[in-house]
Amino acid sequence: MKALFLLALLWSGAAFAISDPAEMLPNPAQEARAENVGRQLRCLVCQNESIEDSNADLARDLRHIVRARIAAGDADNQAIEWVVSRYGDFVRLRPPMNASTALLWASPVLAVLGGLGFALISRRRTPAVPEPLTEAERSRLADLSPP
């Protein structure tokens, strides 16, 4: 019974994208570094997952590359920069603040300011006063009204 419970507990845990143990580095310290680097890089197929969390073929290929670079002696930032040099800043889950990403970083503030501006303009606008009914319209309205 305990074994069944433990098995169910293992199955209910978070799924790891690395489905092949051969994909992991034999050195635990290097593997931890590679996982840390992989968690900073976006899967270009899924776009909301890191390459460590994605099962996409491209993410698997990028995991292999990152692990090969770490095993070859690259520092974490060197492995990241190697991937960024090929795919651009978009591959970072947290892109750096620079001229090309300034609009990306400013877009939430611009959206809030635009919404507030629209709300203020809408509140200031006074509703148009309808013109009074003409005599012909009043008589037609009187004809339509029940007695």
Image: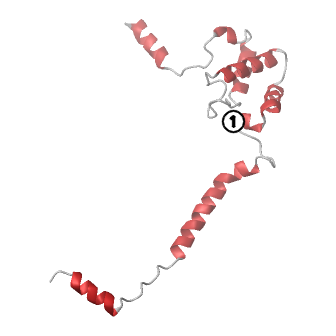
Q: Position of residue 110 (x, y in %)?
A: 66, 58
Camera-side residue of 141 and 9? 141
Residue closer to the observer: 129 or 64:
129
View extreme (bottom): residue: 135
Q: Is residue 25 above or below residue 38?
A: above
Q: Residue at x 29, y 89 (%)?
A: 138
Residue 119, position as x, y percentages in the image: 54, 67
Q: Amino acid at mark 1?
A: Leu
- 9, above or below 3, in the image: below
Q: Is residue 20 above or below residue 137?
A: above
Mark 1 — residue? 93
Left or right? Give the position of 132 relative to 126. left
Q: Residues within 10 Å of mark 1 (few under 14, many from 20)?
A: some
Task: Work out which quarter of the rendered image holds the N terminus and state it.
Answer: top left
Instruction: Judge left or right: residue 127 versus residue 110.
Output: left
What residue is at 65 percent from the left and 23 percent from the top?
Answer: 52
Q: Quadrant of residue 32?
A: top right
At 81% from the left and 19% from the top, the residue drawn is 69
Q: Nearer the viewer, residue 27 or 38?
A: 38
Q: Residue furthest left?
A: 147
In the rendered image, residue 130, in percent from the top left (x then y), is placed at: 42, 84
Q: Position of residue 126 (x, y in %)?
A: 49, 79
Q: Quadrant of residue 36?
A: top right
Dividing the picture into quarters, in which one does residue 93 lie? top right
Is residue 4 left or right of 112 when viewed as pictured?
left
**Residue positioned 49% across, 15% down in the render:** 10
Image quarter in which the C terminus is found: bottom left
Horizontal side of 134 relative to 47 (left or right) equals left
In what element is the residue under mark 1? Answer: loop
